[in-house]
Image (cartoon, rainbow, N blue to C red):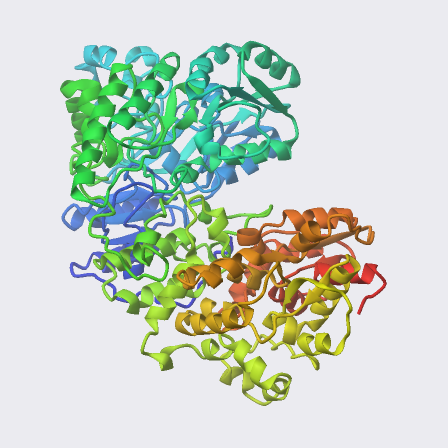
Amino acid sequence: MRRGLRHPGLVGRHQEDPSGLASDLRAAVAGDVDFSVTARALTTMDASNYRRVPAGTVAPRDAADVAAVLEVCRAHGTTPVVARGAGTSIAGQATGTGVVLDLTRHMDGIVSLDPSARTAVVRPGLVLDRLRAAARPHGLTFGPDPSTHSRCTLGGMIGNNACGAHSVAWGTTADNVRSLDVVTYGGTALTLGRDGRGAPDGLLGLIDRNLALLRTGYPAGLPRRISGYALDALLPERGVDVVRSFCGSEGTLGVVTEATVALVPLPAEPVLVVLGYADESAAADAAAGLLPYGPLTVEGMAADLVRGASGLPRGGAWLFCEVDGAGAAARLVRAADALDAAVVRDPAGQRALWRIREDAAGTATRLPGGGDAWPGWEDCAVPPARLGAYLREFRALLAEFGLRGVPYGHFGDGCVHVRIDFDLWTEPGVRDFRRFSEAVADLVVAHGGSLSGEHGDGRARAELLPRMYGDELVGLFGAVKDVWDPDGGLNPGTLVRPEPLDSGLRFTGLPLVGTGTGAGVGRAAARCVGVAKCRVAGPSTGPGVMCPSYRATGEEKHSTRGRARLLHEMALGEVITDGWRSEEVRDALDLCLSCKGCRSDCPVGVDMAAYKAEFLDRHYARRPLARPRSHWTMGRLPGWLARFGRGLNAAMALPFAARLAGVTPERAMPRVAERSFVSWFAERASNRTPALTLWPDTFTNHLAPEVGEAAVRVLEDAGLGVELPPGRVCCGLTYVSTGQLGAARKVMLRTLDVTGELTGPVVVLEPSCAAALRTDLPELLPDDPRAARLASSVVTFAEALETLAPDWTPPRLDRPVTGQTHCHQHAVLGDGADRRLREKAGLTGELAGGCCGLAGNFGFEPGHYEVSVACAEDQLLPALRATEHPTVLADGFSCRTQIADLTEHRGRHLAELLAEGLGEGL
């Protein structure tokens, strides 16, 4: 992540400081104080169903800053303070009405790591994967590993007592914390440990007066008891462990400023055993019986979550069991009594299967057959031996309430995750949400379970704690809170003296906004549940794309989640009050590259490119002169090229042409070819009967005709006759990406008039145009059957060769290639056929993921150059540097342009390489 890249946006706009709180904070702290509309809107929600509007945010630089923030807030009428990491809490505990402490910006480092002692000293904003990466060279790791490990922070894990898949072997976060430095709301700095170390005045006396209650009030046999305060850790027979009792307190007792954590040895030979069972109940019944065989994980999921994933053994439900060594794997398989089993030793194969499990928190939000599901009863736990019985009764309770959900989770620990299709939009639906929550709480307690088995109580379950613990023990929780925080300033309304579980829901008051994206931008953006897969930072590898602008800037407002939150707040109209005219939303969307990566990489399929297009369309409605010049030039590039052709070369050579065109001076505009692809095609003769239509997209036709010519030669060598549409066509991409949807529809309708008589496959060489035809065309013209028909006819170059000429043998090129898979290809089209074609041709090597950063008009616009280059530096440019004298493969015109601008290499379309292999190169 490149934190130095600060987009020159609207920092400080509309500062709200009626009490002087913000100004006093700025005077007191060295960190960042932001009370702007944007900062407040970005932190109203976490990954839960709840919403609270803060006064502002502070990103402290160190413990002294944290203490100063608390001092100022005390002086301002006990202003509440909420510590926040990645904001992935599922119960609402990372939201607040006062000051939100963003601990990820500055307090995110590793202070020290001692391999011999197997400990590390970390700051609370440190992302878990950074600690794991630092420990890995020493053969160590941090044991707890939530599925959000790529973005969750150590402070958040401590606050929620997070667990993860490996808890059957390595326990919860509380089991792996040795000491904590904390600051109380009253300003006292404490170092917490065992033997009563760091206990605030009055705590141990309170415990001594309630020993009998603490010895009898907690359920036994629960490895995942996360609900409430862990006050039994303060019992004398348990070492008066103050640090352990603090873990899971959800930011209500103190603010962590530093932590010493234990590290555990990595398995020497990790092997993944996937066990198939007939159904979920059978898998759940079997899980506890596997524990004596020492598995590192026992994770369960059923077919309604996996949805056709490959590589799984036979069955309707599966247990994912990691073990150390082939011998342990064989013993586990023999003991499992499963229908089928798969033993996966290959690290890549293991990662592919684990990805199914890690994406479940988002995948489960989109139910099979359609419909949204939400957290709210997310992670209860029962004794592992009772899990099968509990799940059967839980499924029956869902049916009784007419609800659907997909359970999955840590079966070896008896912990179940589930997203449920609650109707949280209407009053009757919210009433049923409450009724179900009360009923399922009673069910969990009847099985000797915990209302929370991983993510904490927060606002979602704290009201129900008396059903689990009784009034007396819950009353003791309140007394302990008062000892630590007598002013009640830390995260009030969470865990202790909670607000009602059906109040403050984030859906309340959310209207339908707009029509161009189906249910409206506001409601569509509400699909973002905040799991924050778009917030992954650090060195990136693999095919993923999302979210390039966040990776470049490190700013929440430039993540997919951040933009979704701003659109959500725009629709509500409380924090962002100027609707479609919002400059805050426009500023956040300005760095969206419309890469479409979130369409595939976001577990819930948030489509920010579509939301951006509609927002820009409405933002500039009836204000054409307010649009950036680039919208009129590059946004309407197909029209300009069709009208002036290569005459634009002379125009762009004139002084000040780039500035007049709204193009950044760091870029040189691509030259228009002397002869278009359509002209070349019209001048050649062919006696082949057309088998397909080749789409002459704007980029291929006017800027890279050599790609079209190469494609024709390859397709004809494969025995396929080629024809072009009978008139000028355009997918409308540039109009859509600049939010000119009315113009886009007109262009698309003219195109449909031309293509109405076409039959058979339509081969599109430019991935961005193919993606626009497959997705944007039918979405913008949903009532025109011709749009759906054309969209379904679109195939890529590789797909055409694979399906229409399956017996054709491509030329053997036998060379390594590097380059990049186009982000739209990754997100919309898929690259399976391309991979198979490259393999047949002997083109070896993996292409980089990510986004090239040019992204059509984006990289040409003023103010975008630095971010555009940073996006390229994420994966593309390192891949090019890592290969000596590479053959660079890049099917997208933007990708090839970015490569030419930033390197000495020339990117080639796959069609060009194959044509050269036929001896017909250009």
Please identify the quarter of the rendering in which residue 610 is found. Answer: bottom left
Indicate the position of residue 221 as horizontal and vertical percent values: 35, 12
Q: Is there any visible trace of residue 252 in the rendered image?
A: no
| Residue that appears at 39% across and 61% down | 783
Residue 193 vs 634, above or below: the answer is: above
Q: Nearer the viewer, residue 124 or 335?
A: 335
Indicate the position of residue 874 as horizontal and vertical percent values: 58, 54
Indicate the position of residue 41 as horizontal and vertical percent values: 29, 55
User: Is 166 positioned to the left or the right of 224 in the image?
Assistant: right
| Residue that appears at 37% across and 59% down | 517
Q: Is there any visible trace of residue 626 in the rendered image?
A: yes
Please identify the quarter of the rendering in which residue 726 is found. Answer: bottom right
How many numbered discs sit on the rendered protein? 0
As drawn, the residue found furthest toward the right would be 919
Can you say which quadrant of the picture contains the C terminus? Answer: bottom right
Q: Nearer the viewer, residue 846 or 172?
A: 846
Indicate the position of residue 262 as horizontal and vertical percent values: 47, 26
Residue 617 vs 363, above or below: the answer is: below
Q: Nearer the viewer, residue 580 or 804?
A: 804
| Residue that appears at 26% across and 34% down | 458
Q: Nearer the viewer, residue 406 or 662?
A: 406
Please identify the quarter of the rendering in which residue 96 is found. Answer: top left
